[in-house]
Image (cartoon, grey):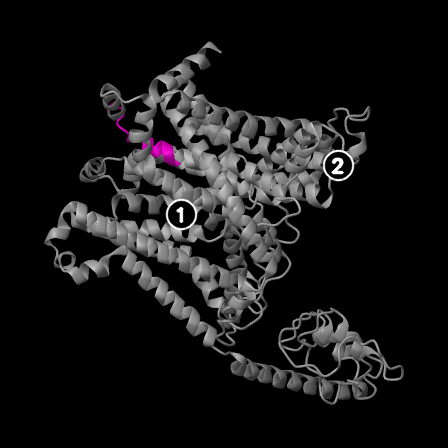
Amino acid sequence: MSAPATSGRSFAVFYSILFFAFLFGPLLIMTVTAFNSSSFPRVTPWECFTTEWFSVLINNDRLMQGLVTSIFIGIGVVAISVPVGLAGALALSEINPALRSALYTVLITPVLIPGVVLGISTIVFWGNLGRSLGGGAQDLFFNGIFLTIVGQVTFISAYAMLIFSARLQRFDPTLTEAALDLGATPGQAFRRILLPFLRPAIGSAAFLTLLASFENYNTTVFTILADNTFTTALASKIRYGTDPSLSALAVIIIAVTLIGAITHEAYTRRREAILGGAAARSALYTNPLGRIVTHPATIFALLVVLAGFAVWKGSQHEAAECKMQIMDEKRANQERLLEEQRLRMQQQPQNAPQAPAQPGTPPAGTNPSPFGGAFGNVAPGASAPAPATPAPPATTNPSPFGGAFGNVAPGATPAPAAPQPPPQPPADANPSPFGGAFKNIAPAP
Amino acid sequence: MERIKGIFGDFVGRHGLGVAIYISASVLVWVIVLIALPQVAMLDYSFRHNLPPAQIGGPEDVYTISNYSYFLFGNGESFNALDTGVLFKTLFAAAIVTFIDILICYPIAFILAHSATGVAARMMVLGLIVPFWVNEILRAFAFRVIFGATGLVNGIGMGMGLWDTPVDFIRADVALYSSLTYSYILLMVFPIYNAVEALDRNQIEAAQDMGAPWWRVHWRIVLPVAKPGIASGATIVFMLTAGALAAPQIIGGPSNLWFTQLVYQWFNDASNWQRGAAYATILLGSCLTFVLLLMKVFRVPIGAIGR
């Protein structure tokens, strides 16, 4: 009898663990990469513990600009879609059943229509309208923020509507009838009975619509036109190269979420204990100190202080020493590889003087450029080509060819316009695709 | 018209004139200005030529089906295998992702509804919601970190000596499908949960007492109850997956396009809004057809969605 039940139980536990591992695994990995000093977000190889990516994130002007735009749009969307969603839910709950399913189908379609389609239809429609109206309307209807608010309201209102509908299903209409019987006007009954009943739903609808607006990409990327929201700025940043500052952003979001979730849990438990009468019996709740400690506000404050302490501690952390060490290791590794290469080069002319360079030699281990070691091999092998002291790749070279050309420039004609002075601080992060590569060709000036 | 007046009068009687005006005006603006007219405008736009602004409304501005025929035949006479192929691949992949989501989410929804209690259940709900709060873009990014050439999977696999050279999971679209599956889990779990929760636990126990094995209990008792929830979740997940843009842009393979990316390219790279509108219409039409077809096959009414 109990055997299948236990096996079912253990399966449930086992499956839940697997499921939540899948759910949280990516987030955990992202969190870890936020603290690795490697310039590409990764867990292995681990380099140094660092908090620098958080300041990189905060100093990204485009993202921060987008954040302001996003907040502005979010407020607009909440202000419109919550009342519209409420109106939709009320209309659905009170019209006759035949019309109800038709209206429901119409109102729910924006959720199902691909966001791309919604975005396009919004800009086309308002663009046409603006053209035919002319004048000031044209400016407004071609404004990215206006279009984004309108486009998002179209489907986010449906989210709000679903929340209100769920709450309205539990509403007892006799309450309104009682109020009317007692002499309240219909308007009063609405304000004093129905709205207070819906208040929790208004809160969660506002929260959900804000979140949906903030997160939306598919519609916004079309309607925002030349402007940028936080999400579109984020997406373009990821598409054109990544660094762990995005992981740092995820860490911030997860931390905020967890603080909110734990506070909410504390609130729910306390409420349940009080409503269920357990509070009066429990020692924790009757004790004044215990009451303060278990209050959600205390827990929230505690968590915020904890997070603040982590931020302060993190800002004190200095990873420079460890990074220097890693750099030295890399440089040593590179020197060793170059040495090996030179030995091979010297042997090569003896074996086959005419033979072209061998492309098969693996490039230097840490060289991010696909041409890294290969070009070193192309360099004429007659005389020992490798630079006596291998120039490490440049770090802070803003121009993609800057350092490279500076070094390639033959010694006969001095290159006065070489944008960077040759001695550069070594670093692993080489922003230039060719910077390190060409250094291997020509001897350092 | 009489009917609308009747409904309006009903609202006035129940909530007063102000509230009635607010409800009717909001719903009408929402349905007409926000939902219906833009779709009509897009449809109209998709049948027009891509003209410079000066010629719009002029004699050249006539209806055409060239944007749609381009989708089928390209510039020449031959079949446009590339774009149609992308559409079929997108729909097929979205269907696969939806199916995997059903498989993953059905057990967890059942556990959540019938095995977990109290704190455990609340923690599970929280655990489901927290990943959903992280931005969609960042979720896709996480899968790039995991599946990239120097990512975690390759690092572990090569570290354990399972394979020598990095496996290109991104080109193989493994990363994309995993990310899409991951992204919409919540939207599959909750509809199924809502449906399964209504099931009377005594029915399961009765079946077990009569000797039914666990799979038959699910097949004959739980699944019929869960069906509307599964249909609802599957519809939402399928439409969102087929319409996804961020994930394919971030972790899509370089040679594999998602249909939304074609739409995006016509709009932003080629500046041909008309053709982009036509492609968007094609996407919408084929997705809706596919979903309605499946709902017909499984005999689920469209009103079940979102409930």
- In the foreground, A383 or B141: B141
Residue B71 placement, left or right of B2: right
Residue occupying image coordinates x 77% and y 84%: A444
Query: Residue A233: which disc?
Result: none
Tell me if residue A46 comes above or below residue A243 in the rendering: below
N-terminal label among 1 and 2: 2
**Residues rendered magenta in the picture:** A163-174
Residue B220, given in percent of the width and then of the height, sits at: 30, 34
Residue occupying image coordinates x 22% and y 59%: A292
Residue A180, given in percent of the width and then of the height, sits at: 26, 20
Question: To which residue does mark 2 refer?
Answer: B74
Residue A415 placement, left or right of A208: right
Q: Main secondary structure of the magenta part?
A: helix
Q: In the picture, which quadrant includes the C terminus of chain B?
A: top left
Q: Is A239 inside the magenta-drawn segment? A: no
Circle 1: residue type: Ile
Residue B94 in sight: yes
Residue A294, given in percent of the width and then of the height, sits at: 23, 58
On the same chain, marks 1 and 2? The answer is yes
Looking at the rendering, which quadrant does residue A284 occupy?
Answer: bottom left
Residue occupying image coordinates x 45% and y 57%: A253
Question: To which residue does mark 1 refer?
Answer: B104
Looking at the rendering, which quadrant does residue A334 occupy?
Answer: bottom right
Residue B166, given in percent of the width and then of the height, sits at: 58, 66
